[in-house]
């Protein structure tokens, strides 16, 4: 490959070159690889001067080089994206221990000179030589720029003099391994003190050349990895913060990968669901009630497949508990460049809030005394029935307790309230499943029948209501005979009016009451 490299440079003397380590990062040019004419590629790697859209092609060419010996890719310079240039890779690791990149293009040198100011690109690759006691013998220009010490100041120092105390044990161990093996030592990351007192992370590889009569030194290649380490530290701090926040939240948290496998759970989730950490979403959420599980499963699938979000309230029955809990489940998709990569599921136990909401809803819709619907709610139910607007029949039964004022006057309102409560229970037992019973006045009740087959069925329902309210009521020491007058009305749902239907049933009820004038509605014994 070396012959091919030299031939290419002879054909294109204005090319730019760089030596590259096995990790793809530019390294100092090997002195033994003497080449005439080419300039030096700026930056830290090819990614510094190639447009991002070509990065994948550059990586593929780089990965092909060790097996093929050489590779070529057409790229566009970030400084001049409109012009194509050729980027070559050559594997000369066998003879010189490095790979070589060659950039060939008519205006590549000028474009890079304009696009990258080398003075603004801090060096990352440096080299020092040391004696067998780790005393610094020489330091290149990059070392001086990275650490801020001059060569004269560095020469004569021991390496440990500028290595962080917490990293000195690692430095000594790697140094001794290198001496014992008489070859290249392990690569280690150590903090080095700059002249201004700041600390710089350097990745150090010591090469044992002490047995080489021409050199007799340890050559240390150093790469400035401060940015990388700080990025890892920042990520670690964020992960720690997330973990602490997750454990402090009152909600349970569940993180899923794109396949629905569990990545993370907090302790609160296990408490809410009554299950230990599991491997899949289905296993982790196994205590969600059977009726509600399809909703949760669909929400998770929507997040993982379509990147959608969803909120839903479900039942949870923990192992060994009879009572069901109510939980609010929030599903949020995690995406990368528009593609779903996973999901976060938060689960909050809202049982007490759900019970309170149910109580408030009941108070808002129910008559406290009789436990029937209140006037507003039963009328809303009738309006909703008629809003269906089809050709089916709907009906109402209006019931009024005969001479109810007498019981209040004779026995007091407490006894009257007991009678009304019993009437409400009798009515609820007399109507069909799906009918609504409401109290619309002091002693007036309305039964809404959303579906009836014909007028004969309406009459049968009205008869059951009248029979249920024709009874003797035992209240304390008093036995009171109850009787009610009822009236009915029915209409095709399409075009019917709720108010008109109730008015018609009310009028029918009064006609019934008048036919019994002279009868006593209340008899006390």
Image: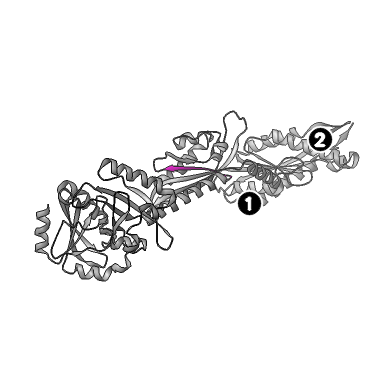
In the image, is 119 to the left or to the right of 368? left
Is 435 one of the magenta-colored residues?
no
- Neighbor class of circle 2 (other Cα within 10 Å; few <14, some 14-19, many 20+) is many
Any magenta on residue 256? yes
Dot 1 crowding, Cα within 10 Å, few <14, some 14–19, many 20+:
some
Percent position of residue 257, x then y:
41, 43
Question: In this figure, which residue is indicated by the disc labeled 1?
Answer: 497
Query: Which residues are drawn in magenta?
Result: 250-258
Q: Residue at x 87, y 34 (%)?
A: 523
Say which quarter of the image contains residue 10.
Answer: bottom left
Mark 2, secondary structure of its residue: strand
Q: Nearer the viewer, residue 85 or 469?
A: 85
User: Can you give x and y, in whole percent of width and height, for residue 283 in the image?
Assistant: 47, 33
Q: CA distance from mark 2 to mark 1?
A: 32 Å
Which of the 4 quarters of the picture holds residue 174? Answer: top left
Q: Nearer the viewer, residue 273 or 170?
A: 170
Main SS type for the magenta part?
A: strand
Between discs 2 and 1, the one toward the N terminus: 2
- Residue drawn at x 63%, y 51% as measured from the top left: 497
The residue that label 2 is drawn on is: 482
Q: Quadrant of residue 450?
A: top right
What residue is at 46 percent from the left and 39 percent from the top? 297
Q: Is residue 329 left or right of residue 33?
A: right
Decide if residue 308 is in sight here: no
Q: Residue 1 in the image: x percent, y percent?
A: 12, 52
**Rendered location of residue 241, percent (x, y):** 51, 49
Is 361 or 224 nearer to us in this picture? 224
């Amino acid at each position: 490959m070396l012959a091919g490299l030299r031939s290419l440079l002879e054909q294109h003397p204005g090319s730019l070159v760089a030596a590259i380590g096995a990790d793809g990062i530019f390294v100092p040019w090997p002195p033994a690889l003497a080449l005439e004419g080419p300039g030096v590629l700026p930056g830290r790697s090819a990614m510094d001067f190639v447009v991002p859209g070509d990065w994948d092609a550059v990586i593929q060419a780089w990965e092909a080089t060790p097996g093929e010996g050489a590779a070529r890719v057409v790229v566009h310079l970030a400084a001049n994206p409109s012009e194509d240039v050729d980027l070559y890779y050559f594997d000369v690791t066998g003879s010189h221990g490095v790979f070589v990149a060659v950039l060939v293009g008519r205006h590549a040198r000028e474009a890079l000179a304009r696009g990258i100011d080398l003075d603004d690109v801090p060096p990352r690759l440096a080299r020092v030589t040391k004696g067998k006691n780790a005393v610094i013998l020489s330091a290149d220009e990059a070392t001086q720029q990275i650490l801020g010490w001059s060569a004269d100041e560095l020469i004569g120092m021991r390496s440990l003099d500028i290595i962080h105390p917490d990293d000195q044990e690692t430095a000594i161990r790697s140094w001794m391994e290198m001496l014992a093996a008489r070859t290249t030592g392990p690569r280690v990351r150590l903090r080095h003190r700059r002249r201004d007192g700041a600390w710089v992370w350097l990745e150090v590889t010591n090469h044992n050349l002490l047995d080489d009569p021409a050199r007799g030194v340890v050559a240390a290649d150093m790469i400035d990895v401060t940015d990388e380490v700080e990025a890892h530290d920042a990520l670690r701090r964020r992960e720690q913060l997330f973990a602490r926040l997750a454990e402090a939240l009152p909600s349970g948290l569940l993180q899923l990968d794109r396949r629905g496998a569990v990545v993370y759970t907090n302790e609160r989730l296990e408490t809410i669901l009554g299950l230990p950490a599991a491997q899949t979403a289905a296993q982790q959420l196994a205590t969600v009630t059977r009726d509600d599980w399809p909703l949760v499963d669909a929400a998770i699938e929507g997040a993982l497949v379509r990147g959608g979000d969803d909120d839903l309230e479900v039942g949870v029955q923990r192992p060994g508990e009879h009572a069901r809990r109510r939980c609010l489940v929030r599903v949020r998709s995690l995406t990368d460049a528009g593609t779903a990569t996973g999901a976060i599921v938060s689960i909050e136990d809202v049982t007490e809030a759900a019970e309170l909401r149910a109580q408030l809803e009941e108070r808002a819709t129910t008559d406290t005394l009789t436990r029937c619907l209140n006037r507003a709610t039963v009328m809303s139910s009738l309006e909703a029935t008629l809003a269906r607007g089809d050709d089916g029949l709907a009906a109402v039964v209006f019931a009024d307790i005969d001479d109810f004022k007498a019981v209040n006057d004779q026995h007091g309102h407490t006894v009257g309230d007991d009678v009304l409560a019993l009437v409400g229970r009798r009515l609820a037992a007399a109507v069909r499943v799906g009918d609504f019973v409401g109290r619309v006045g002091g002693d007036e009740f309305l039964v809404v029948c959303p579906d009836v087959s014909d007028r004969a069925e309406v009459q049968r329902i009205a008869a059951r209501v009248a029979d249920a309210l024709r009874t003797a009521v035992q209240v304390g020491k008093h036995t009171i005979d109850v009787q009610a007058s009822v009236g009915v009305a029915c209409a095709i749902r399409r075009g019917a009016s709720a108010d008109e239907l109730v008015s018609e049933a009310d009028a029918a009820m009064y006609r019934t009451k008048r036919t019994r004038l002279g009868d006593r509605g209340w008899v006390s014994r």
